[in-house]
Image (tube, rainbow, N blue to C red):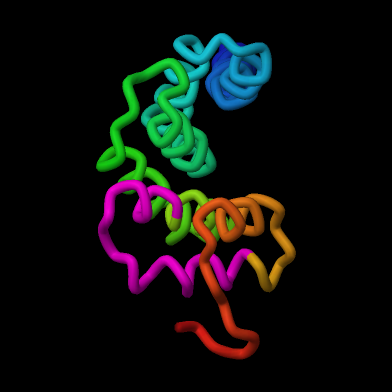
Amino acid sequence: MKKILIFLLIIFTFLLADNFRDGMLFYKNGDFKKAKKSFELALNRDNVIQANFMLGKMYLYGEGVLPQRDKAIKYLKKASQDGNIRANCYLSEAYLKNNTNRDKVVSLLKKGLERNLKECKRIQRIYNIKIKQGTTK
């Protein structure tokens, strides 16, 4: 009986961990509503911190949801705090679109540019943000 319970617990754990993977599959296939639901499950049930990044990006661009910059900022800020460098790029764009924290935009972009992230390069180019070498302002 004990072995059966352990086996069921392991299977149940694997099933829960699939929410983020399912979300990514739905996202890549353009089924954003199902992706959002899966990412929310991954975040709330499975504590998959990368779901913050995906939800923030979806709210920023209105993928399967109405664009909500405040929600995008909340999720992207959390993803950034958890170490997701790409989240810095999108967070800087959310700040630009929301006309808030413009002083943080350059420092956030610079972190991504130091890693040569295409997302930060794109945002820098689109918004014509000047970043001097060796400075954060």
Percent position (x, y) of residue 67? 34, 28
Q: Position of residue 30 (x, y in %)?
A: 60, 13
In the image, residue 42 lies at what x, y percent?
48, 28
Q: Residue at x 52, y 66 (%)?
A: 129
Q: Is the magenta stretch mostly helix, strand or loop?
A: helix
Answer left or right for 11 relative to 100.
right
x and y percent of residue 102 in the render? Answer: 33, 66
Q: Which of 93 and 28 is in front in this view?
A: 93
- Say if residue 10 shows up in the picture: no
Residue at the image position 39 percent from the left and 52 percent from the top: 78
Quadrant location of the C terminus? Answer: bottom left
Left or right of 52 in this view: 134: right
Q: Residue at x 60, y 19 (%)?
A: 27
Residue at the far right in the pictured view: 116
- The answer to which image quadrant residue 103 occupies is bottom left
Q: Which residue lies furthest to the bottom in this view?
A: 134
Residue bounds of the magenta highlight:
93-112
Q: Which of 37 and 127 is in front in this view?
A: 127
Q: Residue at x 37, y 19 (%)?
A: 65
Residue 110 magenta: yes
Give the quadrant of residue 60. top left
| Residue 92 is one of the magenta-drawn residues | no
Nearer to the camera, 30 or 52: 30
Q: Looking at the picture, does residue 39 appear above or below residue 107?
A: above
The quarter of the image holding the N terminus is top right
State how many labels appear: 0
Task: Let me know if residue 110 appears in the view.
Answer: yes
